[in-house]
Structures are given as C-alpha cells and as structure tokens.
Amino acid sequence: SSDDSRPILTGVLMAAEADGLRLVATDSYRLSLRDVSQASVLAEGQSVLIPSRALGELNRVLAQGDEVTLRLGTNQASFEVGSVTLVTRLIEGDFPNYRGLIPDSHPNVLTVNREELLDALRRVKLLARESTPIRIEMSDDGMELVAITQDVGTARESLESTYAGSNLTVAFNPQYLLEGVEVAPGEEITLSTIDELKPALVRAVGFEGFLYLLMPVRVS
C-alpha cells in the first residue's frame, strides 16, 4: 500500500519459515506472498516490517551483485549488494494476520497458460475504462474474459484452459489481476475460487512458494 495513513500496510513483512524466509505484503484488497528457501536471518517465530520504499530502492541496485546480505538490528535493517549498502528503519507495529485471510480450500480451480492469459488481459483491458471490472466466465468449456463498458462496447476473449468446478463468473479489478499474473513464476497458473465474492488465489504451477490473493469485485 502507498497510503501513509495506514503505515503498517506500507511495509513488507519478513518472517522466519521452516525452510527460509517469507515475504508478505497487502493493501487490504490483495495480498502477495513469496517464500525464499535456504535464507536464514530471523529466529523461529520472529518477524520484521521493512518499508516498501526501501525495498523499491533495493530493487534498483540488485543488478550490481549476485548476492544480498541482510543485517537486522533492533530498529533498522541494512542490505549490502556489491559496494552499495542501503540502511532503513523498521516499521513498528503488528502486521495483519495474513494466514487467516487465505482460504483453506477452493472447490473451483482453473488452469491456464500464463503468457496467453496476460496477452488476453491486456487486450480486454483496453475496453475496461476506469473502474470497469473484467469478468472471468469459467465452465467445462474453458474460460472467457469479458469487459463491458456502458456507451462504449463489450470485449470478449476465449482462452484454452482446464477447469474443475461449477460454472462460475467472477469479476476482478483488471489492473490488480494483471499485476498478480505478471509476477507469477512458471508457464502456467491456477486461479482458485470459492464463489463470486470470496477471495481468489493465483498460484504458479510447480512453484509452491508463491501466492497472490485477490478480492473479487461485486457486479450486477
């Protein structure tokens, strides 16, 4: 989040996991989770909040080295990449209980090629003006992306996919959905849903350490 009125949400949670380090971020509409295996810097059960702006700066200097050294102090963190050292203060406070936001199971699972979905989203998004959601119609026949903009027109695009579940139409903020699919690793993704109102999960096939949770948009 970039909303400074809720400073906790402007940070990225770094937490110790059994096999390494977990990074979690949310803006209350979506949530992203990434596990980094074999990276240990925190004791079991320990976590810190890193300002997202600091990680944005870190991203600029990552090309200067093959490794990142993270050092944690009482109220600050430092990142060393090559000859560059970036120091930032930690955010104080308790991060939301993100585990409670992630549904345990989803009865509907759609599997689709990531690049093909990205291309289709970008084309259909051209007609999704301002807050117009993109609807995903899922059935045994596959999936169809639909954007309906009053007084402008309708965009539809069908994609080859596999689907297990009941016929369902779910709508999402097109930019939020696009950004989640863009950062997913691998060649295929799954979109797991419960119904048209409960949180959906984007996962990468073959990559257990990535998860992107997205709230649907209510449409008539």
Image: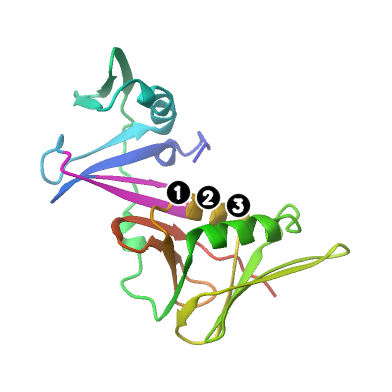
Find disc 3 in the rendering and name its residue.
175
Crowding near pointer 3: few (<14 within 10 Å), some, many (20+)? Answer: some
Q: CA distance from mark 2 to mark 3?
A: 6 Å
Nearest to the observer: residue 47 or residue 4? 47
Determine the residue positioned at 40% across, 81% down. 107
Q: Is residue 53 visible?
A: yes
Who comes first in sequence, dot 3 or dot 1?
A: 3
Q: CA distance from mark 3 to mark 1?
A: 13 Å
Crowding near pointer 2: few (<14 within 10 Å), some, many (20+)? Answer: few
Task: Reply above or below: 55 against 94.
Answer: above
- Image coordinates for residue 143, horizontal then vertical, percent: 58, 76
- Image coordinates for residue 216, horizontal then vertical, percent: 55, 66
Circle 3 SS class: helix
Q: CA distance from mark 2 to mark 1?
A: 7 Å
Type of amino acid under label 2: Glu
Q: On the rendered image, what quadrant is the C terminus found in? A: bottom right
Is there a contact, CB below 8 Å, between mark 2 and mark 3?
yes
Span highlighted in magenta in the image: 22-39
Nearest to the observer: residue 156 or residue 200? 156
Query: Which residue ends up furthest to the left in the rendered image?
Result: 43
Q: Is residue 16 magenta?
A: no
- Would residue 203 be found to the left or right of residue 68 on screen? right
Find disc 2 in the rendering and name its residue.
179
Determine the residue positioned at 33% across, 21% down. 88
Nearest to the observer: residue 204 or residue 79? 204
Is there a contact, CB below 8 Å, between mark 2 and mark 1?
yes
Type of amino acid under label 3: Gln
Determine the residue positioned at 88% across, 64% down. 151
Find disc 1 in the rendering and name its residue.
183
- Image coordinates for residue 112, horizontal then vertical, percent: 48, 69
